[in-house]
Image (spheres, grey):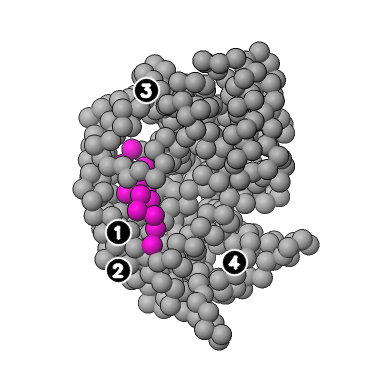
Amino acid sequence: MMIDFIPMRKILIILYPLTMLIPSCGQSGTQVKQADPSGKAIVRIMTVDPGHFHAALVQKVMYEQVSPDVNVYAPSGPDLQQHLERIRSYNNRPENPTKWNEKVYSGDDFFEKMLVEKPGNVVVLSGNNKKKAEYILKSIQAGINVLADKPMIIRPEDFPQLEDAFRIAGGKNILLYDIMTERYEVTTILQKLLSSNEEIFGRLMEGSEQEPAVSKISVHHFSKIVSGSPVVRPAWFFDVEQQGEGIVDVTTHLVDLVQWECFPGQILNKEDVKMVSAKRWPTIISCDEFKRVTGLDNYPDYLSKDVKNGSLHVFSNGEMVYLLKGIWAKVSVEWKYQPPPGGGDTHFSVMHGSKCDLIIRQTESEKFVPTLYIENIKGSSVRDFTAKLSEVLETLSYDSLQAVNVSEGVIKVNIPDKYRVGHEEHFGQVTAEFLKYLEEGKLPDWEVPNIAISHLTT
């Protein structure tokens, strides 16, 4: 397998254009101006070019303050049809059906039409990433709040547009927000909460390049089940010039989690980040596998550059080691064709503290369910530590958490099923948070600068 180590010069070239972005990021957001007959403020969603199934997941649930009428502006074709079919499946499900009314415009000038008509005040962007920077900037220029799926940008030349978008959003008092779903996974939340408890975790270690203080490793799959059906990937999803490489895609989530857990509520800036090393390598997809997941018999011409000996080489994998405020961190993402039986996308995370390590595993041993462990306990007996941990767990806003010794020096936190919210449901949680910020008219002071830092790092 081919592994490319990215030269430091190239990393710096990628990072430099964003260095002026941080001090100009706006914090405020627009108050929702549309209203229903009772005078209550409402949100009207517009969806642009929904080529990724994440766009539909935003609408898997209804929201009290959101109109059921959603205007969709997109080119005609399978991406649009699959999006509408997912919305129909949510509307027609037997339990808790949604009531979305999709109003579709599919002319070639779909984006320009949206900017002129502006029937809504929030645009959802989740699709082909090649034009996402342009969509973000022009939507912000038109005075529209933007809820964008990661990554916001995939090329160095896109950075000036993102910089302008943040600056203009601040001047217009509108919101530009990233869909960071992984902050809502319960084991990640508990890892963050426990890492901030000095009695349990102590202090976050500095680590080293060889053994970082915090590591996050994510494994994803091209073929998987979404909303009960096998996902059909558009061919462009396999083109790094349209989807982006793995090192700037899912990695954005992992970098955000490192910041969110290690330095909660702190405003970060470019001086806090020092990239040390990075590498990328391809996932090799056979022609038959490509056909099964896309429905296409042949590779499109734009993928010919990535075809070798009849197989598609997709640079969807990447790893970075860097320093954040003096703490060593590693993030890694890998894409495989399909998960093992009974499995799915997986996440591994470790935070090394002076008193213990907090580790999330999601392997076959955990039946592919994210599970939080406390290991390498230092400074007290396992018995005393378990008793203290149980006391701390009782103070958290999650009832019935249990600390259980599963092996020598290893404690597992048992979490009730009611807190086990799946990845698809996280999109509703993110959207609900975004709607709260819209109502309040601003984002937290740290949020926008740190969104920029997460894209600077990747």
For the C terminus, the image quarter is top left
Q: Check disc 4 and report the residue beneath it.
A: 63
Q: Are marks 1 and 3 in contact (CB under 8 Å)?
A: no
Identify the amino acid type marked 4: Tyr
Q: Check disc 2 and report the residue beneath it.
A: 172
Give SS at disc 3.
Answer: loop
Q: Is residue 449 magenta?
A: yes
Q: What separation in Å lies between label 1 and label 3 (alpha carbons)? A: 32 Å
Q: Residue furthest right?
A: 94
Q: Which residues are magenta?
A: 442-457
Q: Are marks 2 and 1 in contact (CB under 8 Å)?
A: yes
Identify the amino acid type marked 2: Lys
Report crowding for label 3: few under 14, some 14 to 19, many 20 or more residues within 10 A (C-alpha). Answer: many
Q: What separation in Å lies between label 2 and label 1 (alpha carbons)? A: 9 Å
- Answer with left or right where residue 247 lies relative to residue 288: left
Question: Is residue 361 shown to the viewer in this render?
Answer: no
Q: What separation in Å lies between label 4 and label 3 (alpha carbons)? A: 42 Å
Q: Check disc 3 and report the residue beneath it.
A: 206
Q: Check disc 1 and report the residue beneath it.
A: 26
